[in-house]
């Protein structure tokens, strides 16, 4: 019993220390850019209650009748980006946690129009979702998400390049940066 309690305490300590760390996320795996995509963007909350970059973003694959797949993107400030994901199907940002620790659920099927946090990946490469801010709500409707001008795609590509430097994705990102100049 003492070993179990000690093991649980070590595990809990690692979780707490890992969650509190501000260190950059580890380098994503270098998968073949020809058969996968990387989604990136920026998400923050601009309200009085929830203000600043969000954490613990969850992407959910939305495929009727298919297996549910959840992905937790890497974060650097308000920027988020994924490991290379398989091409095909729809995805959505289903939830995130504010800096204050509040879990926010994103509704995409609610009235108010199509959510900008839903996207489809039909071809390989880079998918810039956009830069967004959200309202102060624990359940977000599509109308609670606002597109922002900053950071720009080019700003985020430069940060993405740092994360993927030395991988097959470096060439893809550099090409996109040069096409945006």
Image (cartoon, rainbow, N blue to C red):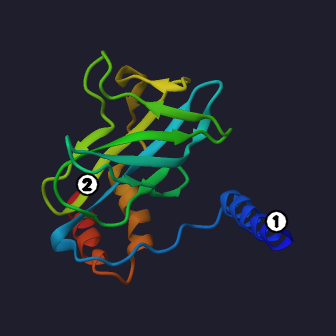
Q: Is residue 151 visible?
A: no
At a point 52% along the width and 72% down the height, the residue shown is 26
**Which residue is denoted by mark 2 in the rendering?**
127
The circle drawn on residue 5 is 1
Q: Nearer the viewer, mark 1 or mark 2?
A: 1
Q: Please identify the residue farthest to the left as the structure is shown.
A: 123
From the top left corner, tell me how far across and down residue 179 is, in percent.
Answer: 20, 62
Q: For the residue labelled by badge 2, is the local secondary structure a helix, a strand or a loop?
A: strand
Classify mark 1: residues with Cα within 10 Å, few (<14), some (14-19) or many (20+): few
Residue 84 occupies quadrant? bottom left
- Asked if residue 2 is positioned above or below residue 90 in the image, the reply reads below
Judge left or right: residue 59 versus residue 56: left
Judge left or right: residue 48 versus residue 142: right
From the top left corner, tell me how far across and down residue 171 is, in percent.
Answer: 25, 77
Q: Please identify the residue farthest to the front as the structure is shown.
A: 1
From the top left corner, tell me how far across and down residue 32 is, in percent.
Answer: 23, 77
Label 1 to label 2: alpha-carbon separation: 45 Å
At a point 82% along the width and 70% down the height, the residue shown is 6
């Amino acid at each position: 019993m003492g070993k179990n309690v000690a093991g649980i305490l070590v595990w809990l300590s690692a979780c707490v220390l890992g969650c509190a760390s501000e260190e950059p996320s580890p380098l994503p795996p270098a998968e073949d850019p020809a058969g996968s995509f990387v989604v990136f963007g920026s998400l923050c909350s601009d309200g009085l209650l929830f203000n600043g970059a969000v954490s613990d973003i969850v992407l959910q694959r939305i495929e009727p009748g298919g297996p549910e797949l959840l992905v937790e993107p890497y974060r650097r400030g308000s920027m988020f980006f994924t490991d290379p994901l398989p091409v095909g199907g729809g995805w959505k940002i289903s939830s995130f946690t504010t800096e204050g620790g509040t879990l926010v659920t994103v509704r995409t099927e609610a009235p108010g129009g199509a959510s900008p946090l839903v996207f489809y990946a039909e071809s390989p490469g880079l998918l810039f979702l956009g830069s967004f801010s959200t309202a102060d709500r624990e359940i977000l409707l599509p109308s609670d998400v606002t597109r922002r001008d900053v950071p720009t795609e080019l700003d985020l590509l430069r940060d993405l390049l740092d994360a993927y430097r030395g991988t097959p994705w470096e060439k893809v990102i550099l090409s996109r940066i040069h096409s945006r100049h």
